[in-house]
Image (cartoon, rainbow, N blue to C red):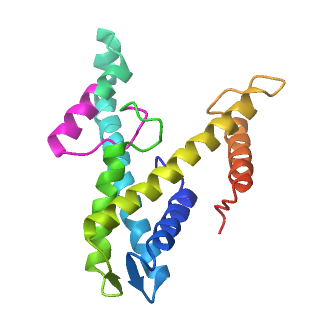
Amino acid sequence: MLLARELVAYLSRRIVTGLSPQYLETHYPDAAVDAVAAVIEAELQVEDRLNEEVREMLSEYSEYMRREGVSYQEMFRRIKNTLMSQRKVIRASGRDTGDAMKLSRDKVNDISHKVVAALRKGRDFRLKKDANEMRLEIVRIMTDLLVTEEKVDRAARTKIRTQKRDIPEGTEEWDLLHRRYYAEEMKKLGIDLGR
């Protein structure tokens, strides 16, 4: 998934606390957090499933691609783009669309619409303002957190690059260091993803 589950959980809590009580009234804030998290996770998993489907398709043609000298990455990109346009899937990765954040602005807007719809359907929640005002507040909360998260990610990557020896990205050591530095940088900002 593009965002860690801990970040999705934190983002969901931030959205619910940011909406309550001005935009959203509920006696069950945990249920609201769960509903928001479910929407975000479902939306992020759409592209993950699509990526897996493309990998399976390409595995059937690996011999052909090797024989013809076709780039795996290029074929992956082409097939994925075709399937995304056919299925009307909104690209989740902001970096693929030129956004500085991990999630594209289009995906953030799409998620905000679906979060409002999910909260509107829930019996335990009452919207106190216009749905579009609420949606815009969700977009603002998500964007603020994602911009902060991007800075934290950059700081963690910089710390890894400044090690005395080169640690290649994708290795177990790199992943462990990234998680540790990422958590440290988040805590500096008062964000504890463990809660």
Residue 142, percent from left and from top: 45, 55
Instruction: Give me the residue at 58% from left, 47% from top.
Output: 148
Which residue occupies the foreground of this view, 156 or 112? Answer: 112
Q: Does the magenta stretch include residue 115?
A: no
Residue 23, percent from left and from top: 38, 75
Instruction: Give me the residue at 67% from left, 40% from top.
Output: 175
Residue 32, percent from left and from top: 42, 77
Task: Classify 31 as above or below 176.
Answer: below
Image position of 192 (left or right of 12): right
Image position of 42 (left or right of 85): right
Instruction: Give me the residue at 75% from left, 34% from top.
Output: 159
Instruction: Name the quadrant containing residue 77.
Output: top left
Q: Can residue 61 be seen in this view?
A: no
Magenta span covers which residues? 78-96
Residue 132, percent from left and from top: 26, 64
Which residue occupies the foreground of this view, 151 or 7? Answer: 151
Q: From this viewpoint, which residue is outermost toward the left?
A: 86
Q: Can residue 57 be seen in this view?
A: yes
Q: Which quadrant is home to the C terminus?
A: bottom right
Task: Classify 195 as above or below 189.
Answer: below
Image position of 85 (left or right of 4): left
Tally of marks = 0
Instruction: Give me the residue at 30% from left, 23% from top.
Output: 75
Q: From this viewpoint, which residue is outermost toward the right?
A: 164
